[in-house]
Image: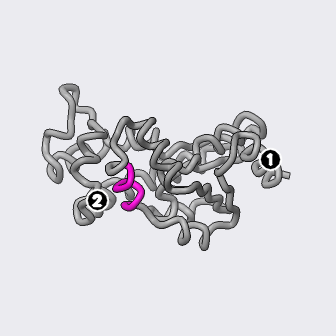
Amino acid sequence: GGIGSGKSAVSRILKEKYAFEIIDADLLTEETYTWVHRDLEESFGKAIFDTQGKVIRSQLSQCVFGYPDKLAKLNAIMHPAMTALVRRKVNQSENNVILDAALLYEADWDRLVQKTMVVVSPTEIRIKRICERDHVSPDVAMKRIQAQMIDGERVRRADVIIYNVLDVASLERQCKHIVE
């Protein structure tokens, strides 16, 4: 699912109740930034880094969201490195794995998994979650949503669809149905 859809909530349920291992692409992003530091600096400047040389995600987001050419440049830098890391993590795992990734299809990571599961949620709810989580305005949240694949395309390509519109109990019932 896209940003703010509830992927992490579903991943948490599958981990806690069914012992799935979670590979969180957002967490792998931090590791990938160190590998591609030079390319990021050349493309987006030093202003996206803090004094320790770590990427300031909010700065990088401001540089790319709303600018399709810059977002494409970022993806061209990040996706190959992250694909290698994701592939290694999936191959090293001895358990059932959930790859929690907003850009599963955009990065072609659907090729690394046996089945795809998409979490969808209404745009208004997603905007609210993004604003609360990331402390950004609704306009910024909407730009992030619009920078990703539309839900209809994700749903069309998915093997399994989870609708995150009610409460945690509803998500748990859907997860149980999927696993059994």
Provide residue 144's location: percent of width, then percent of height: 37, 54
Q: Which quarter of the rendered picture does the N terminus lie within?
A: bottom right
Residue 127's place in the image compared with 80, above or below, is above
State which mark lies toward you, 1 or 2. 1
What secondary structure predominates along the stretch shown in magenta? helix
Q: What residue is at 60 percent from the left and 73 percent from the top?
A: 156
Q: Secondary structure at mark 1?
A: helix
The reply to whether the magenta stretch includes residue 118 is no
Provide residue 118's location: percent of width, then percent of height: 62, 59
Residue 89's place in the image compared with 17, above or below, is below
Instruction: Report how far apart the C-alphas of labels 1 and 2 lie in the structure.
Output: 37 Å
* Residue in front for this viewpoint, 57 or 142: 142
Residue farthest right in this picture: 180
* Residue in front for this viewpoint, 97 or 87: 97
Q: Which residues are magenta?
A: 141-147
Q: Which mark is residue 71?
A: 2
The residue beneath circle 1 is: 173
